[in-house]
Every structure is written in structure tokens, then in C-alpha cells.
Image: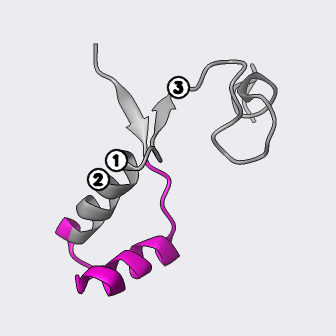
Amino acid sequence: MTKIIMVPLTTGELVEYAERTGADPTEEATRMAVMRETVAAGGAIAWPPGRNDRCWCGSGAKYKKCCGRSGGF
């Protein structure tokens, strides 16, 4: 079974990483490196979240009461 993870990353975090490492934020290798660093730091989100886990969107609500509710958003 394939495990899917999401790596939430902002443009600001990418730029900060690029400045810190001297990398080019427009290059795929830089984007992959910052994602690997984020995952190693525990910043990945398993997909799909459990129904009673906090929603991945950042609302603070349980997934089942937010983006995971029946009938869409």
C-alpha cells in the first residue's frame, strides 16, 4: 500500500531555506531539499487524516467536521 504524505510549505519558508543554504528557490532540487528537511523535522502530514484528527487546512476543527465532511466543502 502506498503511503501518501503532504508537506505544507510556504513561499516564505522556501525563500528562507534558499537564503540559508545559498540555493536557488526556482530550482526543483532546492524545493525537494526543503521538503526533505521539513519531513525530517516532523512537518509532514499523513493523508488522509483520521476523522477525529485536526483538519489539515489549519481551521482547528476536526477533519470530519471540516474538509472531510460528507457532501464536500
| Amino acid at circle 2 | Arg
| Amino acid at circle 3 | Pro
- Span of residues in magenta: 7-29
In the rendered structure, the answer to whether residue 23 lies left or right of residue 5 reads: left
Question: Which of marks 1 and 3 precedes in the sequence?
Answer: 1
Using the image, determine if residue 71 lies above or below residue 5. Answer: above
Number of marks present in the image shown: 3
Disc 1 from disc 2: Cα separation: 6 Å
Nearer to us of marks 1 and 2 is 1
Residue at image location 24% in from the left, 86% down from the top:
22
The quadrant of the rendering that contains the N terminus is top left
Q: Which residue is mark 3?
A: 48
Q: Quadrant of residue 63?
A: top right
Residue at image location 50% in from the left, 53% down from the top:
8
SS of the residue at dot 3? loop
Q: Which residue is mark 1?
A: 40
Using the image, determine if residue 36 lies above or below residue 72. Answer: below
Q: Position of residue 25 (x, y in %)?
A: 30, 79
Badge 1 vs badge 2, beta-carbon distance below 8 Å = yes
| Amino acid at circle 1 | Ala
Residue 15 drawn in magenta: yes
Residue 61 drawn in magenta: no
- Tell me, for residue 36, which label it has, or none: 2
Question: Which of marks 3 and 2 precedes in the sequence?
Answer: 2
